[in-house]
Amino acid sequence: MINDESKIKKSYKGVAMEGFIARWYAKNTKGNMEQYENWAKLVVENITEGSSVLEVAPGPGYLSINLAKLGNYKVTGMDISKTFVEIEKANAEEAGVNAEFVHGDASDMPFDNETFDFIICTAAFKNFTKPIKALNEMHRVLKPQGKALIIDLRRDASREAINKGVDDMGLNWINTLFTKFTFRFGLLRSAYTIDEMKELVSHTNFRKYEILEDQRDPIGFELWLEK
């Protein structure tokens, strides 16, 4: 296994969203609740009643909260941002759901081996500074035959598709402009291509995986992993 991740990962250094930026993000992504609901339903299609599910980098926690509403699941969210953990806990309490949110690093998770049946991570993996370690941590905390799903932006996504996706978020014109700018000059530069994701996975403990393009999102991919 390659230990020097700098040979593979992007030069981009992910920084945890804290304070005002985290609260701004939580407010603006709330309008995209249908997407979180759809992701939660996708998780339910791949688990059974009583399953333990981990969401890595849940941000405001909307996906985990929607998942907790759908059945008897043990839902845990882990985020490196202390502000987001506070927001997640407040949102879960307001929604009246049983979901646990903890502070932690994707490359050094605070969980025992073989804890979870399913792991999901959306729109965050490109920001991880140690992607191989993060994938191996997912492998470690998954139960045998457990699955992980990573959904994220593709670096080769077209500008037209991105603009349409942002327009569909229902933001005001200022936030629409700022979000498009962020995609073009920030997020795209840190995103991976499909071939780069395959290269990353090849240096992890995962041996079974599948990458789906354009299945549900024209600007992203789904990486399905199985322990």
Image (cartoon, rainbow, N blue to C red):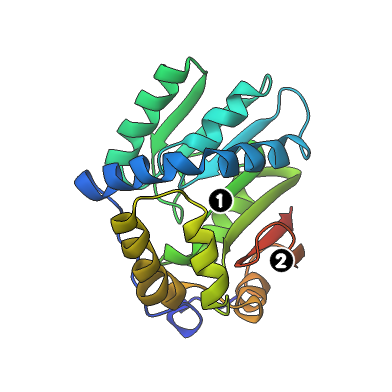
In the image: residue 5, left or right of residue 69 = left
Q: Position of residue 77 (x, y in %)?
A: 48, 36
Q: Report which residue position mark 1 lands on.
A: 121
Give the residue displayed 59% in from the left and 52% down from the top: 138
Q: Is residue 207 above or below residue 67?
A: below
Q: Is residue 164 above or below residue 6?
A: above
Q: Is residue 114 visible?
A: no
| Residue 151: numbered disc | none
Q: Quadrant of residue 197?
A: bottom right
Q: Position of residue 9 (x, y in %)?
A: 47, 77
Amino acid of disc 1 = Cys
| Residue 214: numbered disc | 2
- Between disc 2 and disc 1, whose residue precedes? 1
Secondary structure type for disc 1: strand
Q: Residue furthest top?
A: 96
Secondary structure type for disc 2: loop
Q: Position of residue 209 (x, y in %)?
A: 76, 63
Amino acid of disc 2 = Asp
Between 114 and 67, the one lying in front of the other is 67
Q: Position of residue 56 (x, y in %)?
A: 50, 46
Q: Residue furthest front?
A: 173
Give the residue displayed 74% in from the left and 65% down from the top: 212
